[in-house]
Amino acid sequence: MSDPTRLSRRYSTMVVATISLIVLTCAAYLIPMPYVTMRPGPAFNTLGQFDDKDMFTFGQGVKTYPTSGALDFTTVSVTRADTRLSLADAVRAYFDRDVAVVPKSLVYPDNQTAKQSTAVSAAQLDGSKDSSRVAALRAAGYTVTGRPQVAALVPGGAAAKLLKVGDVITQVDGTKVASSEEAVAAIATKTPGQPVAVTVERGGRTQTIEVTTRADERDPKVPRIGVSLGTKYTYPIQIDNNVGREIGGPSAGTMFALAIYDKLTPGELTGGRKIAGTGEMSADGVVGPIGGIRQKMRGAANAGASIFLVPQANCSEALDGDDDGLKLVKITQLSDAISSLKALADDPDAKVPACS
């Protein structure tokens, strides 16, 4: 005959174990996970308008040419840095073909706050506007010159209280410098601890400031003054990019450059069709890889595009799944994109570089 006390204990143990399992399962589904989701975002026609204003406007007297069709830049909708993604959310997103679940650290490094992430993204957009403008103008036959400019100062660095962000460096130790590379090379002739005379333009005035170099933290033989250098460009014509700060990051650069080029040169790149693409654009016309290629392809297809421009480095990822009915054109430089689009405008069946 069974012992009622033993049965009661066994039943209690089973109840406790069941409740514990339910609690742990619920907790697992509610505890925030270190992941974010990436979803297809909207596409914007660079030949059209943004917030009821032409995306690109040109200075008075600048000759532009008619365009047709669309050159869409594509976007990705990413969960905010302060969003708490639960296991349940992550599991649901994992089984959605339009959504990518990626480690949060890949999108928001160093535990960036939402505010910090927005600032970084806005700065990347500003850089993209500049580099795409330079690349497009040069491709269209214009001359664009640039000079080294202080882009950032290392906190507590040698120049932290001497130079200012925005200073344009014209000379180092009395020798003219025309690029960031030349400025760095001139400073590199010093021995750490030696002073260097840096001549800058600031607020319409020229002044020479002496900065004592310091040893590089990783290589004590290399002199540093504690600045990051960018480039201050002088443009031959006025071009305004009117994309607002609600769009961020550098990946629209290629489509920005194509739109500027299309408007400044005779003929039409699109052949009247809706074309989309992505890719970071350098000032010298090199197309760089981006993130979220699959989501951008889906967004382009949703917007009705038939051709999608893919940075070469993103081709393998672009091919890892359905092409959404898009013709995937491989690009490595702005000139590649231009020549491929011109060929396809003349003949939709033309052979152009493709992801394969």
Image (spheres, grey):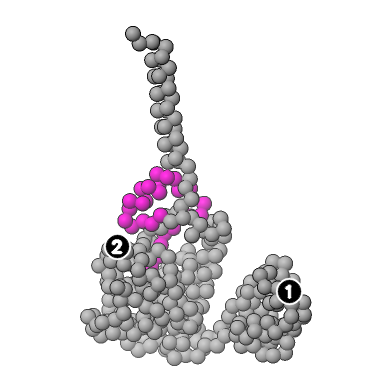
Furthest toward the top, the residue is 1
Q: Name the residue nearer the viewer: 202 or 277.
A: 277
Residue 83 x %, y %? 48, 50
Picture quadrant where residue 254 is located: bottom left
Circle 1 sits in a helix, a strand or a loop, which is it? Answer: strand
Give the amino acid at mark 2: Gly
Task: Give the residue at x 42% y 88%.
Answer: 140
Q: Position of residue 138 (x, y in %)?
A: 46, 87
Position of the N terminus, as image quadrant, is top left
Which tag, 1 or 2, sits closer to the chain's start? Answer: 1
Point out the stretch of residues depicted in magenta.
Answer: 73-101
User: Does 76 lie within the magenta span?
Assistant: yes
Query: In which image quadrant can residue 167 be found?
Result: bottom right
Q: Residues within 10 Å of mark 2 (few under 14, many from 20)?
A: few
Q: Judge left or right: residue 22 versus residue 179.
A: left
At 60% from the left edge and 83% from the top edge, which residue is drawn?
Answer: 181
Instruction: Determine which residue is flagged by label 2.
Output: 321
Q: Is residue 47 visible?
A: no
Q: Is residue 19 above or below residue 126?
A: above
- Picture residue at 43% right of the left edge, 56% below the top: 102
- Which element is circle 2 on? loop
Query: Is residue 119 magenta-colored?
Result: no
Determine the CA span between mark 1 and mark 2. Answer: 51 Å
- Report the side of 277 relative to 188 (left or right): left
**Disc 1 marks which residue?**
214
Residue at 62% in and 86% down: 182
Q: Is residue 271 visible?
A: yes
Residue sitting farthest toward the front: 1
Left or right position of 211 against 23: right
